[in-house]
Image: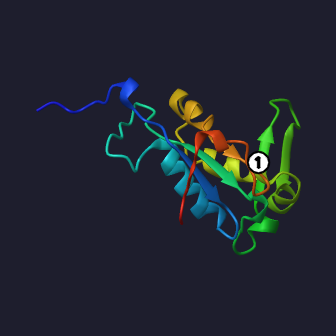
Amino acid sequence: MSTFVPPVREIEKSWHVVNAEGRTLGRLATRVARLLVGKDKAIYTPFLDTGDHVIVINAEKVRLTGKKLKDKFYRRHSGYPGGLREVAAEKLLAKNPEKLVQEAVFGMLPKTKLGRKMRKKLRVYRGGQHPHQAQRPQELIP
C-alpha cells in the first residue's frame, strides 16, 4: 500500500483569527505554529505546505509568566564585530508587540524554505481590528 500524498491544487487553506488577549505567549505560539504547519489536518504531509493562514489580534495584551518580562532578551547580530543588539521582552512588548509574537511563533517553525513560506501566512496586529474581513476568517476558540 502506498502513502497518500495530496495534490497541491487540492490543499485547501482556511483563515483563522486568534485573540491573544490574556493568553500566555508560549502556549499561544504553539497553537499558532500548529495551524501554520497544518499538523491538525488529516492531509498533513511534512514536505508540503498544508497549513492555514492565521491572524493574531490584540498582540499587546499577551501575557508572559514569571520574571520573563525583565529576564528574557531577544538578540540579533549584524555580523560585524560588536554588532550584538539585544532588547528585553518588556521593552519589545511596549514598543513592538507584533514582533514579540512573531519571534515566538517563528522559533517553532522549520528553519527551511518551507518554514519561510509558512511565515508569510502569519499576520499579527496590535489592536482588535484586522483588514482581512474579505477572507471570512473563523474565530478560533482556545
Q: Decide: is 61 above or below 51.
A: below
Q: Residue at x 54, y 56 (%)?
A: 30
Q: Indicate left or right for 96 with 139 as reference.
A: right
- For the C terminus, the quadrant is bottom right
Q: Indicate left or right for 5 with 39 as reference.
A: left
Label 1: which secondary element: helix
Q: Amino acid at mark 1?
A: Lys
Circle 1 crowding by C-alpha within 10 Å: few under 14, some 14–19, many from 20: some
Q: Which residue is mark 1?
A: 99
Report the colour scheme: rainbow
Residue 1 in the image: state x and y as whole percent.
10, 33
Which quadrant of the structure image shows residue 113?
top right
Q: Nearer the viewer, residue 9 or 45?
A: 9
Q: Residue at x 56, y 49 (%)?
A: 16
Q: Residue at x 74, y 59 (%)?
A: 58
Q: Residue at x 39, y 24 (%)?
A: 9
Residue 138 in the image: state x and y as whole percent.
54, 52
Count the numbered circles shown.
Answer: 1
Furthest residue in direction bottom, as rendered: 66
Residue 72 in the image: state x and y as whole percent.
75, 61
Which quadrant of the structure image shows residue 3?
top left
Q: Nearer the viewer, residue 18 or 120?
A: 18
Q: Decide: is 16 above or below 46.
A: below
Which quadrant of the structure image shows residue 119?
top right
Furthest residue in direction left, as rendered: 1
Residue 49 in the image: state x and y as whole percent.
46, 33
